[in-house]
Each structure stands twice: as structure tokens, then as C-alpha cells.
Image (cartoon, rainbow, N blue to C red):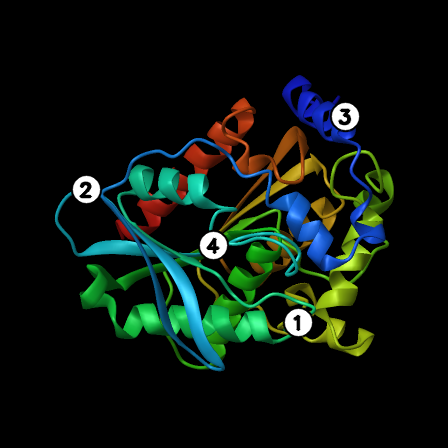
Amino acid sequence: MTLDPQAKLVLDQIKKANNPPKSELSPEKARKIAGTNHPLEKPEVGRVEDRTIPGPDGEIPVRIYTPHGQGPFPALIYFHGGGWVLGDLNSSDTSCRLLTNGVNCVVISVDYRLAPEHKFPAAVNDAYATTRWVADNASSIEVNPNCLAVGGDSAGGNLAAVVAMMARDKAGPILSYQLLIYPIVNYNFDSNSYHENATGYMLTRDSMIWYWNHYLHNKDEGNHPYASPLQADDLNSLPPTLVITAEYDPLRDEGEAYAKRLKEAGVPVVFTRYKGMIHGFFTMTETIDKAKEATQQAVTALKKAFSK
């Protein structure tokens, strides 16, 4: 399929901005550019609270979105994208609000530590610690501890997948679902989609190499299942999963390979490739219709998971 016209418009606007490639920037400069691109839309939710919670190496900032009505509610712990180097609580603000309202659940968005200042597994440890904290402190934030899910986009999808594995490996908390939106799941740059979509579709092969180089201490860490879930020997006993990929995305093939391996391990999986779409489209609900469609798919999947 050809590139979606709305996605093409986004790419044209990015090209017009004429910013240098991330691979030529320092993390600080890349963050400054990324910080100007947050969506303006802010759907109203019942309540939003910014706070910190205890982490393995200091306080972790979180943003808690609570829907209108009376709890306890199901909960989604959400991890933003940005290649473990970029992003913050504002990056996924609109998506978290839409999920809060659509699912009628509490969403806990996590401002995990970023690389290269904090390399692997700092983000992983923050992500798991937050999930554990939500389970242990559920009543204080109007959450039903028996209805917990994890989710995220891109690097956040990586963290969600890893947290699901850690929750299984560490005997808790029990998760009802994982929402993986074009997740990074493999330290490998040689898939067909990496070569087909190496340049021209926002996320590039060079920028993914840049992200991984900042995230890892060394290449060997890329083989660890908590960095590359696709390389895990055992994917059994993981929660039901929705995997969303984009056709024009270097990460397409690894996300789809992960969905296939989960299914082979007996995990209930729904997988959708959004035709004509680019990496990052899920958060572009202001400009891309298929972002609204994907959000609704996520809402429907989470509501179904939480109703069981």
C-alpha cells in the first residue's frame, strides 16, 4: 500500500522544519527539538495528579489520570516512547487521556529515567517498580489491583513487554493485558523493514542505532531478554496482548515477529499492521484518522480484558 496522505503531510511538515538527523545531535539538542512537538489537544478527564513514588534509585515522577465516576477502576501503567533517550510525561499526555476516558480506567504514566545519563536497565527497573507500586498501593489511587495492564509505544512498548516478563519471572504482580504499540523488541538492524524503511519515514535506521547506542553500556547487553524481549527463550505465561505495527516503520518486522512468538507460546494475541502508517502515528490523533482508529482498538481490547 502507498503512504497514507495524512502521514505524508506529517512527513512533509517534518521535512520543512529541516532539523538535523538525530544521529548527528547530542541527546540534549534532540530533547530540545522533541520538546516543541507535543500535541495541543487535552481531553478532559476526571482528575490528573503529578506526583513522585519511591523507586529503586530515587523518586520516580508519575502522572495519574483518573476518570470521572466512582472507583475502584482498572489501571493501565503506561510508558512513553522516545528511544529511552527522549520523551517525558507530556509526550503521551493526549493518548493517556483518551485511554482513561475510553476504557474508564486509571492510567499511570511513568517518567522513567532516560539514557545516556541512566543506561540499561535503569528504565526497566523504574518501569517494574512503578508497576509493583501500583499493585501494592492500589486502594490509595482508586485502582482494582486485580485489573492491571501495562502498555506503551516504541521504547515504551519495549518497557511494557519487559515488565510483563519481569512480573512473570518475579511472581507478580499479575497482569491482565499488555498493549504493545510498534514496540522495540530486538537489538538488530537487519530486518526487511529496517532496510525498506531506513530513511524517509521519520524514524530511521540510523536514529535507532543512535538510540540503542545511548541506551546500552555495550552491545552484549542487547542480547539480554530484558533489553530484547524477542530474544527471550521463554515467552510462556505472559498476559494477553495487542500488538500494533505501522507499515512504513523500521520496527514493523520485529513487532510482528514478537506477536508470532507470543502466539506460538500460547499467549492470546491480536496483531494489527496499520497500512500506510509511519512510526509514531498512534499519538497523532489530531492529524491522522488511523491514530483515532488505533486508539479505539486499544480501548476496546483493554475494556474486554478488564471485563473478565
> Which label's residue is closer to the chain start, 4 or 1?
1
Q: Nearer the viewer, mark 2 or mark 3?
A: 3
Q: Residue at x 34, y 73 (%)?
A: 133
> Label 4, on which residue?
151
Question: In the figure, is residue 197 to the left or right of 147?
Answer: right
Query: Which corner quadrant of the image does residue 215 belong to?
Result: bottom right
Which amino acid type is marked by label 1? Glu
Furthest-top residue in this view: 5
Location of residue 175 with respect to 39 vertically, above or below: below
The residue under label 2 is 68
In 3D space, how far apart are the residues under numbered discs 4 and 2 (Cα atoms)?
Answer: 21 Å
The crowd level at tag 2 (other Cα within 10 Å; few <14, some 14-19, many 20+) is some
Q: Secondary structure at mark 4?
A: strand
List x then y, in percent, for residue 118.
63, 73
Residues at discs 2 and 1 in contact (Cβ within 8 Å): no
Question: Residue 241: percent from the left, percent from the top?
Answer: 48, 53
